[in-house]
Image: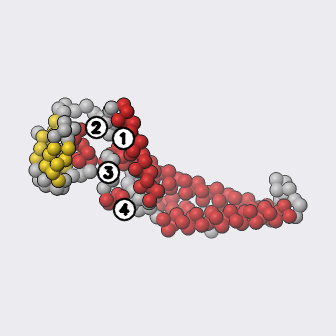
Amino acid sequence: MYGRTACQLVKEFASGDKGQLVSFNSDLFQQVVAECSQHHLELQSLIRKIQEEGLDIQTARNADHYGALIHHLALVRNKRCLMAYVYNRAEIIRNLLWKIGHVLPQEIEEKLSHAEEEHFKKHSTALKSYMSKVMVDLTVDMVPPKDPYIKVRVLDDIGDGILLSDDKTANFACHSMHLLKRTDAEQFISRGQMEELSG
């Protein structure tokens, strides 16, 4: 039945947790694109047939007209489903930039298609460029902190020689504790590499 594959693609996206990405289903996506191509070919064939019979496409009401209408509506529906799938995934990807920063964790990157990875990189580059022009980091916490410094524990071995905002370098070995500027620590906290210690 026409449109069933596209509907399955949208249902797959909708069944996931809100704001969470599932792996890009390239097989199903390509099946819908192939179905769109088939509808387009059938539509062109029926329109040609109507024109060859000397009938007006706008006023003819025969089997070919209704067949063309069905293929046209199926094509439009499939395209809308594809656009909904891509748009909603793009929204989640753009929101990831605000939640976890400019570097995607490996487990999220594996779920993206190549085009989505490029979209994230370009969006990230555009945001970095804008922030450098206005000299404000928009990705930091929107609630002003009580103290600009926070105490953190390193959860993953990040390495040494990490450059901080005050041009100092730090060694972030696993389980080490540091007193850092909130702006320096937030990128690592959002990636799950550090945790903020209370008190």
Q: Is residue 125 above or below residue 35?
A: above
Pinpoint residue 83: horizontal percent, then vertical percent: 55, 53
Pointer 3 residue: 103
Pointer 2 residue: 141
Of marks 3 and 4, the one in the foreground: 3
Q: Secondary structure at mark 4?
A: loop
Q: Earlier in the sequence, mark 1 or mark 3?
A: 3
Q: Earlier in the sequence, mark 4 or mark 1?
A: 4
The residue that appears at 17% across and 32% down in the rendered structure is 147
Q: Amino acid at mark 1?
A: Lys
The residue that appears at 41% across and 42% down in the rendered structure is 126
Q: Amino acid at mark 3?
A: Val
| Quadrant housing residue 185 | top left
Q: Is residue 145 left or right of residue 88?
A: left
The residue that appears at 35% across and 43% down in the rendered structure is 98
Q: Amino acid at mark 4?
A: Glu
Instruction: Judge by depth and name the residue closer to the eye, 80 or 155.
Output: 155
Check if mark 3's residue and mark 4's residue have beta carbons within 8 Å: no
